[in-house]
Amino acid sequence: MKALLLSLSLAGLSAWTLASAAAQETETSGNVRTVSAEQPPLIEPLQSSPDLDFKSLLKPRFSLQAEWEPEADELGIASYDLTATIPTYPFFGPPPPLLSGGAGLTMLYAPARYRLPDDLFDFTLGGAWIRPINERWTLRWMLQGALASDLKNTTSQAWQIRGGGFAMYTPREELQWAFGVLVTGRENIPVLPAAGLIWESSPKVRWNLMLPNPRLMFLITERDQKQDWLYLGGGFAGGTWAYQDISGADDRLTYSEWRITLGWEHSQKRTPGIFRPPGTSTVAEVGYVLGREFEFDSARPDLSVGDTLLLRTGINF
């Protein structure tokens, strides 16, 4: 769920820029990651390719995602997300600055005594830019404005700034480091350090140790430039939304959860030196969700609910 997944809130900014959906994580994350349809890594080789024609350079990317968490303690969650990322003219050479917009819907299925809104919306608009400094160092910036609300409370509580900045270091092709910060838009964790590495220990094993959503990936099949990856992942998710409670008073809630996931991704083989993710990728993921909790700006007590399962699917094209 876009609104529920931190990496996904920033994934729309990063989806088009990543070298491959198969090189995930993110996340997201965040991504931050977009994105393979699921969560992209924060870093990837971003050098341009001499074979990349102008038409391909300016081609937009789209991401569709859906998530379901079945009912536990009488609370179920479903969410749906659409993101479009459009490159601008490469004034300073590739990769070009990017514009990104998205819309997400999160539905809460809860009894009336929980006093939760039924529908939460998330609309985003932003941009990103990646600039290679030399063969080893790359800088990346992301900035995004968001309206996160039930659309009844659209006061200043509903408006957020998200983004981040990173320095990425690639000492060799199979190893990349990243150092930076994320501005999440969340009330409980407004700023999050983001650091880690992506290491291809072999052609069939990729360690994506990027916080906040690390992942270990295994290549299981490869044919006709298509790859299937199996991965183990984890991390935390959540978000902050403004809403109007049953008395008509404006309030704001922050939802948090931890995840352990097992996923599969089908994508085209990554081409070294190409910063644009090729073709279409699809993803399916199951997981276990724990530590689910709602916090509120008002004086009402926090609400904790039981563990549940996760089903997520998506496509990036």
Image (cartoon, grey):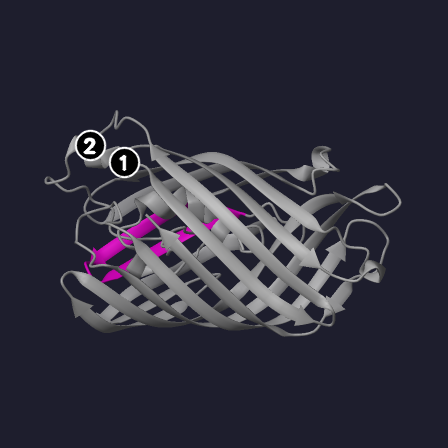
Residue 315, position as x, y percentages in the image:
38, 54
In the picture shown, does residue 32 fall above or below 222?
Answer: above
Report crowding for label 1: few under 14, some 14 to 19, many 20 or more residues within 10 A (C-alpha). few
Q: Would residue 189 be seen by someone viewing this image from the given angle?
A: no
Q: Disc count in the image?
A: 2
State yes or no: discs 2 and 1 in contact (Cβ < 8 Å). Answer: yes
| Side of 79 relative to 110 (left or right) | left
Residue identifier under label 1: 59
The numbered disc on residue 55 is 2
| Side of 188 relative to 4 (left or right) | right
- Where disc 2 sits, the SS reads helix
Residue 119, position as x, y percentages in the image:
68, 49
The kind of residue on which mark 2 rests is Lys
Q: Would residue 310 be seen by someone viewing this image from the given angle?
A: yes
Residue at the image point whose x is 14% and y is 35% from the top: 53
Query: Which residues, given as a range, are shown in magenta?
Result: 165-183
Residue at the image point whose x is 61% and y is 52% from the top: 106
* Viewer-closest of 165 and 247: 247
Residue at the image point whose x is 22% and y is 35% from the top: 57
- Where disc 1 sits, the SS reads loop
